[in-house]
Image (cartoon, helix red, strand yellow):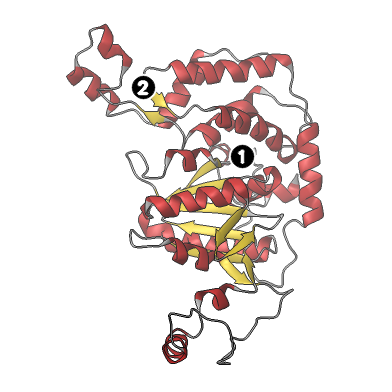
């Protein structure tokens, strides 16, 4: 438990994702995006010993740009130097001289530049919501199929984590709805909330563990020479403990009540998918070993609901609100929904459902 108490919320979010072997979505304000990216890179490389790659997406990003950014040199394969022999095979419609000129300009063909490379273990997809639809679909294929097929087939490593690093927006994200559903949990990073808070209860509000006074250790990762936070074997042991966490019938019913109430909430237009329900159950179990528990309790369930459904809930508008069919005026509905967000909906549902004793 003491080791978990020393971790900040970003490290805990990465740890949870690695335990569950699923992916994470992190948001922050635009001015904090650069330092948060550096912190995530340090957590991945120095904290967990993972090879790290960063891809910064824009509306002009192509699929080849995205794939090239997440590939790193494979240490087990020596890079093959491009051959300049005129005897090598080439397109019969292209002359040898034009082919040599093109290679001199680019430093090698795309095939040669990608050969001997592999997908990084820890991929930070910055501004993924700004990428074109085709690039987001490529990211979706990578998450679901654990491989990409561009020129060559590249398989994701066994320990693979993609983190979408986005700017927090007040309205719905531009991420593809199917891609959003693939992210296990979401976390909003506010530097002001973690600036050496002396109030453990306030500090625990956005965290996944109950912190003790004085337990926060800032800058826990100071150098790349420091011992890893958790080794691969320790991560596997935590995964085993999470699988063994007991989920009672009463707690299971409580979780299903939350799912049903979220689906039926007047301000919810979608996002409560079957995949989200599976992630909900997975997260409550993963939180148990981090809090020193062997069973799931109601407080763990309530915390997991925010993490799993916070980025998935699609808030209704005046045209999709069901009360309009019962005679509500669109202007009144619009004023009500203008102040509603995902956290407010989850909080309202948790207040309506009685937790098991």
Identify the element where label 2 is drawn. loop
List x then y, in percent, for residue 179: 48, 43
Q: Residue under label 2, please give it.
A: 267
Residue 4: percent from left, percent from top = 70, 47
Q: Is residue 235 left or right of residue 196?
A: right
Q: Nearer the viewer, residue 299 or 96?
A: 96
Residue pictured at 44% horizontal, 20% vertical: 348
Q: CA distance from mark 1 to mark 2?
A: 26 Å
Q: Which mark is residue 162?
A: none
- The residue at the point 69 percent across, 24 percent down is 297
Q: Earlier in the sequence, mark 1 or mark 2?
A: 1
Indicate left or right for 177 with 141 as reference: left
Q: Residue furthest front?
A: 92
Q: Would you say residue 197 is visible in this rendering?
A: no
x, y (%) of residue 254? 62, 16
Residue 255, compared with residue 134, is above or below; it is above
Which residue is pictured at 68% across the width and 18% down the height? 251
The residue carrying mark 1 is 208
């Amino acid at each position: 438990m003491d080791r978990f108490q020393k971790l900040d919320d970003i490290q805990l979010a990465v740890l949870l994702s690695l335990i569950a072997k699923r992916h994470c979505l992190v948001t922050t304000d635009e001015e904090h995006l650069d330092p948060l990216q550096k912190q995530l890179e340090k957590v991945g490389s120095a904290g967990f010993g993972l090879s790290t790659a960063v891809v910064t997406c824009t509306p002009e990003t192509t699929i080849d740009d995205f794939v090239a950014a997440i590939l790193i040199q494979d240490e087990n394969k020596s890079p093959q130097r491009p051959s300049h022999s005129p005897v090598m095979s080439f397109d019969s419609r292209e002359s040898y001289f034009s082919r040599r000129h093109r290679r001199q300009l680019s430093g090698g063909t795309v095939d040669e530049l990608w050969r001997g490379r592999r997908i990084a273990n820890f991929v930070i997809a910055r501004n993924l919501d700004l990428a074109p639809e085709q690039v987001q679909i490529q990211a979706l294929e990578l998450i679901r199929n654990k491989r990409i097929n561009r020129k060559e087939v590249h398989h994701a490593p066994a320990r693979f984590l993609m983190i979408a690093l986005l700017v927090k927006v007040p309205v719905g994200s531009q991420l593809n709805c199917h891609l959003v559903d693939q992210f296990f949990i979401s976390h909003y990073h506010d530097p002001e909330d973690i600036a050496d808070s002396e109030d453990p209860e306030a500090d625990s509000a956005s965290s996944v563990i109950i912190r003790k006074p004085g337990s926060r250790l800032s800058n826990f990762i100071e150098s790349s020479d420091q011992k890893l936070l958790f080794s691969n074997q320790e991560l596997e042991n935590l995964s085993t403990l999470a699988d063994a966490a007991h989920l009672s019938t009463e707690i299971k019913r409580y979780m299903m009540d939350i799912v049903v109430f979220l689906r039926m909430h007047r301000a919810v237009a979608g996002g409560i998918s079957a995949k989200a329900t599976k992630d909900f159950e997975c997260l409550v179990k993963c939180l148990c070993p981090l809090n020193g528990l062997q069973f799931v309790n109601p407080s763990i369930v309530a915390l997991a609901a925010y993490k799993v459904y916070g980025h998935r809930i699609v808030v209704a508008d005046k045209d999709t609100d069901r009360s309009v069919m019962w005679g509500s005026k669109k202007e009144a509905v619009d004023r009500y929904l203008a102040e509603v967000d995902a956290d407010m909906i989850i909080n309202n549902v948790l207040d309506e459902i009685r937790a098991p004793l």
